[in-house]
Image: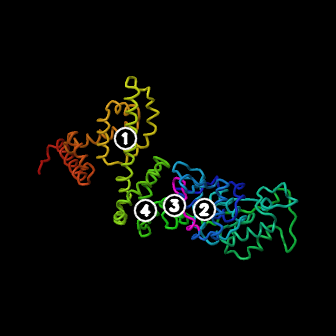
Amino acid sequence: MTMLNREVLKQQKVLKLLSSVSLRLIPYLAGNTDLDGRINVTKEQIEEANIMTPRLINEALNKLESVGLIHKDADGYLYSNLNTISKADNHSFHYINIYNFFQSSEFKKTYKRQLLFLYYILTAKLPGTEHSVALEHLYQNRSNAKNVKLSFFISFEDMMNNLLELIEKGLFEVRLGNSSEVINKDTKTIKDRLYTFAGKKGKRKQRISHKEEKHKIIHIRISKDLVTKDKICDIYDMTRLSTLQDLKSIAKEYGCSLDSFDVKVLEKVHMVKAKIYKEFGNVGIQLYRDSLKEFFSNRSHAFQYLMENGEFANTIKNYYVIPRVEEKIRAFFDQVTNEYVNEVNTLPYQSLNLKHALKDSKSLVSYITEESFNDNLILLDREFEAANSFIYEQITQLDKTWYEFKEKVEKIFRDEAETHGNSRNKVVYLAIQKKLSQKERDTVSKANQNNKSHRELLLYNPYKTISY
């Protein structure tokens, strides 16, 4: 899933170059960014999100592009440099979730200095936990110029007014000094309490001390109720669908819609796409999109039925994605075979630098080994044997991924012989008929296994009588 990249959002020097509308647009674009970085929203959708007046949209996008936070690719789409992908093995604080409050009216009415301060607090600590800072370090002052560490505000009053507004909007919660009381939007007399703590009474303000121990420490956090788990904008939410926007837009071209389907159905589609991306990266995403286009051009009439029955994701994978992957593997094998025949044709074969060439095929072979039907694996194995058995043997000996593919094929042959008594030729025949992966054969297989176990048990128990 794509998230906001924390390191990008920490770049205050870059953010300060942006207008308030560009700053507001950042979470919206990040929330609608696909796995390959493509921003799946139109200008019309940005207008509908009510983040800014329509006449400012182009200006806001151009500014984000000028500072390198987004870019336009050769395909004409905008791509995000704002995002990162969350991985299970990365436990560092490297991303910011796309929270619902980014689409709230309070956030959309927030101005530049408030946004900069909010992004600072959001990235300083885990959202919902406190960040402690001296008030004296937040604003510019002639008597304190050397000690201003976070120049967000132009004066004391500017700081207080913006801090007060962030609390009243419900975006911030604060503690003052050693007090355990949390001040939030529901607290009475917030302004008086902030000014009293800061040392201002009426028009007179206490002189700033240059001694750190006398500074006014305030503890600020993003309001806890905004960053709980249930306040994260789900990728299956119809207002987001960040990784499903390509499906949504292609489906729309053929008079189909996603808005009536259960989240579990959408999740299956996302997982198929995520698996393809994990194996092949951006190339895989294009392969997936090409598969969607082919499906809708031929079978759009079946879309709703397949979605309602939870079969669409596997249909795309098994009958559109995997055949494309197999074609790429065949092309690789043909290339290696042709190089051998035309350029080498002598031993040792290592002169082809085969190990280097195999790198391009690893992810392809790994994917079909794990995801493809047994019928497909058997037939692909037979193709390679028939095309050039010597090259095939060399490849499976040199590369672990190809070896695992061959081992899975051999296991299918062994299981078929053991369970059904099928010869290798019979297994190939069944694969041609697309019968190896049929569910009814799995049922028969389990029944045969149970009968076999029953017989083996009886061999060791002479007091049991076999009866049929």
Q: CA distance from mark 1 to mark 4?
A: 32 Å
Q: Earlier in the sequence, mark 4 or mark 2?
A: 2
Q: Earlier in the sequence, mark 3 or mark 4?
A: 3
Circle nearer the viewer, 1 or 3:
1
Q: Earlier in the sequence, mark 1 or mark 3?
A: 3
Is 83 on the left-hand or right-hand side of 185? left
- Image-quadrant location for residue 204: bottom right
Other-residue count near label 1 (Cα within 10 Å), few / some / many at <14 / 14–19 / ≥20: some
* Up/down of 74 relative to 164, above or below: above
Tell how many labels: 4
Q: Tag 4: residue type?
A: Leu
Q: What secondary structure characterizes most of the magenta part?
A: loop
Mark identifier at residue 27: 2
Q: Could you tell me which secondary element the residue under label 2 belongs to?
A: helix
Q: Earlier in the sequence, mark 1 or mark 2?
A: 2
Residue 363 within the magenta-colored segment of the rendering: no
Q: Tag 3: residue type?
A: Ser
**How far across and down, in percent of the image, does residue 125 sit?**
65, 57
Q: Tag 2: residue type?
A: Pro
The residue to which callout 3 is attached is: 242
The residue to which callout 4 is attached is: 266
Q: Which residues are magenta?
A: 34-46
The residue to which callout 1 is attached is: 330
- Whether tag 3 and tag 4 are in contact, CB under 8 A, the answer is no
Pick the residue in front: 89 or 371.
371
Q: Earlier in the sequence, mark 2 or mark 3?
A: 2
Q: CA distance from mark 1 to mark 2?
A: 43 Å
Other-residue count near label 3 (Cα within 10 Å), few / some / many at <14 / 14–19 / ≥20: many
Q: CA distance from mark 1 to mark 3?
A: 33 Å
- Whether tag 1 and tag 2 are in contact, CB under 8 A, the answer is no
Q: Could you tell me which secondary element the residue under label 1 belongs to?
A: helix
